[in-house]
Amino acid sequence: MTAADGFVSGTQKIVDHGADSARYNVVVLGDGYRAADMAQYHADVQAFVDAFRQTAPFGDLWCGINVHRVDVTSTDSGADDPLTCGDGSAGSGATPRTYFDATFCSGSAIRRLLTCDSVRARGVAQSQVPATHLTLVIVNSPLYGGSGGDIATFSTAPGAAEIALHEIGHSAFGLADEYEYYAGCSSGEAGHDVYAGGEPVEPNVTRNTNRATIKWRSVLTSPQDALPTTANANCAQCDPQGNPRAPDYVGAYEGARYMHCGCYRPAYDCRMRTLGQPFCGACQKTIRDTLAPYLPLAWQGLWWKSPAASESGWGLNVAHQGDIVFATWFTYDAAGKAWWLSMTAPLVSGGNRFSGALHATHGPPFSAVPFDPTQVVATPVGTGTLTFNDADNGTFAYTVNGISQSKAITRQVFGPLPACRFGTQANLAAATNYQDLWWNAPAGSESGWGVNITHQGSTLFVTWFTYDVDGSPLWLSATAQKTAALTFSGTLYRTTGPAFNANPWSPAAVAATPVGSVTLTFANGNAAAFAYTVNGVSQKKQITRQIFQAPGTVCR
Ligand SMILES: [Zn+2]
């Protein structure tokens, strides 16, 4: 290329989860897009970003990822397509002038091998985004092709992005090819019968079938099934047998890393073996481990007015999963009666700013049997915006019934503060900190009421969002101490206080009246019995975590 073949016009941060210095930065470049093709380029990048997010486990890790789109204009459209190629295919002979000089049949061997000037591409990425971790180049051509290396290149042909996802497995995560041949099972290839080298360095292939020491032992599907899962009876060829287990089963299958025998792969199939397949469990674990340092702390927890205790009596419970915050605000109405509002607030920007509509909700009395969720009615009363400045400080700005206010907030601390992260633990039952929003089990069966649990040390602060005998919103709270393993108990209080908009808001005017007791008994990190007595009414409900974006957030 020459300077006349195009120009870089700017960079847009199209997925923003916070400062580049703290996140995993993906930079997308385009080649063969003319000025007139820029709208198409933006659409192509977005389509790739959507597909990337849909590719497990990247969706779970999304809040640790920033995506930057660099707008690169080429003089001509498309990519070089040589007339002849080593694989015998015929090309158009096109030689468009493009900024990164993308070409099919790179090295004159295989038509689908699409590369570009990777030195130049990396240079542009790093000059636009100094904290770049992963560089991708989308080539504006309907011909199928792609390649890996220190940058991944792929065309806009259907399925071509799969090439990039496989190549990212190599370049960004150090994964091996899991296929058990080199040129092909039917190629008659020699030298690929039995692996004779040392233990491979890659995390997804091994010569070790000892379940106690195999490198992916933490993700084996079965704690007792014999390993290997399959053995190849004839090492002169690829193993022809089908998968004796479920598609997502992780064990040890003989045949991997270009060898028919002596080397094992974690799953029967994987994106590192066959394009279009999901990453296997071992590969997903490697990707999760690699991105874990980039995951932000979740804002999950109990917040109140800053400085601490200055407005003791109201608070804000934040459940934070992925790019969504669900907040429940416990405060008081104009008559001083306990009142709660809730807000589903999607991420607005920077990983730290969330905005949504505030709702006041009416529903069946807490003691109704059965509790009919179809009778719950949520009425919008305004809007709220949460902005977090650091791990422990933020601002809650709201407009409720036409009244606009803003309060500095901080975390309410009554014990050792846990650190909460989204997406780091798929098995919620294994969690030992219970801080989260819980609701009736099974999930969705009594939608409309919930229990926010703040868990610090051996103490739970419980706020229960439900409805009074007249159907009006009611919240009760309790400080529950650990009384036995997995059991927490405390007195339930009903509270009155100054209206949410009182200025000044005096905590001295808050009055808490004991109305009963509560006991939470946890079967595991995702199941508990919620037993309470309120004004002489004793009931017991099974509760579970409310997951609005899988796999949820776990605190430790
Ligand atoms: Zn794999």
Image (spheres, rainbow, N blue to C red):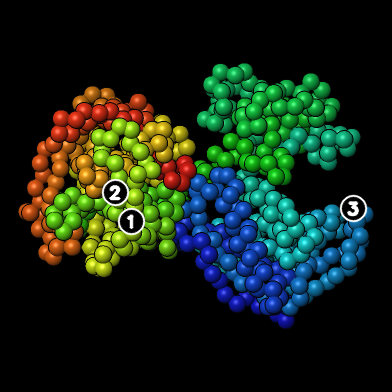
Looking at the picture, how far across and down is residue 164, in whole percent? 68, 53
Mark 1 element type: strand
Whether ligand 1 has any atom under 8 Å from the Cβ at mark 3 is answered as: no
Which residue is rendered at x = 37% and y = 30% of the image? 527
Residue 131 lies, with reference to residue 276, above or below; the image says below
Residue nearest the observer in this picture, 474 or 85: 474
Q: Position of residue 331 (x, y in %)?
A: 20, 53
Relative to 25, 240 lies left or right: right
Position of the C terminus by quadrant = top left
Q: Are marks 1 and 3 in contact (CB under 8 Å)?
A: no
Could you say which is closer to the camera, residue 548 or residue 81?
548
Q: Amino acid at mark 1?
A: Thr
Please determine whether, in this image, residue 208 is positioned above or below residue 353.
above
Q: Earlier in the sequence, mark 2 or mark 1?
A: 2
Contact, CB < 8 Å: mark 2 with mark 1? yes
The foreground one among 297 and 49 is 49
- Vertical side of 374 occupied by 219: above or below: above
Where is residue 373 shown, x and y percent of the image? 37, 41
- Residue depicted at 23% across the width and 67% down the height: 403
Q: In screen coordinates, is 236 left or right of 309?
A: right
Q: Residues under labels 2 and 1: Cα distance?
A: 8 Å
The mark total stands at 3
Query: Which residue position holds label 3?
Result: 87
Mark 2 vs mark 3, CA separation in Å: 69 Å
Q: CA distance from mark 1 to mark 3?
A: 65 Å
- Whether residue 32 can be seen here: yes
Disc 3 element: loop
Quadrant containing ligand 1: top right
